[in-house]
Amino acid sequence: MSLVEFIGYSASVMVAVSLMMKNIVWLRTLNFIGCLLFVIYGIEIQAWPVAGMNAFVCCINVYHLVKLYKET
């Protein structure tokens, strides 16, 4: 397995695990990490829709994490 494949599989696992979280902060954090890995993976395999969509989702996760942080 190449490093790029490992990053892709790791991204898939992180996103799947994030969706099992009850705590919204953990969900957003793990989902952010998974999406960031997908951005790296998408760039490496030159799959621009994968990289672009996941970069957008990363921004959404960061926005909501900052909003949650400010509320507490």
Image (spheres, grey):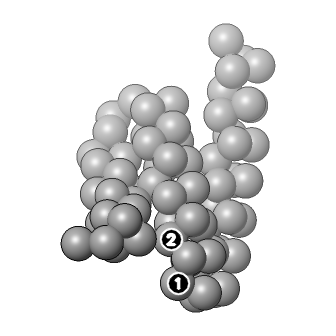
Circle 2 residues within 10 Å: few <14, some 14–19, many ≥20? many
Which residue is label 1 attached to?
Answer: 45
Q: Quadrant of residue 71?
A: top right
Circle 1 residues within 10 Å: few <14, some 14–19, many ≥20? few
Quadrant location of the N terminus in the rendered image = bottom left
Left-right relation of 65 to 13? right
Tag 2 secondary structure: helix
Q: Residue at x 63, y 47 (%)?
A: 61
- Camera-side residue of 29 and 39: 39
Q: Residue furthest top?
A: 72
* Residue 54: x %, y % from top left: 60, 68
Kind of residue indicated by mark 1? Ile
Left-right relation of 18 to 61? left
Quadrant location of the C terminus in the rendered image = top right
Residue 41's disc is 2
Q: Residue at x 31, y 64 (%)?
A: 6
Q: Residue at x 29, y 49 (%)?
A: 17
Kind of residue indicated by mark 2? Tyr
- The reply to whether dot 1 and dot 2 touch (C-beta < 8 Å) is yes
* Residue 62: x %, y % from top left: 69, 42
How many badges with numbers are in the image?
2
- Camera-side residue of 12 and 42: 42
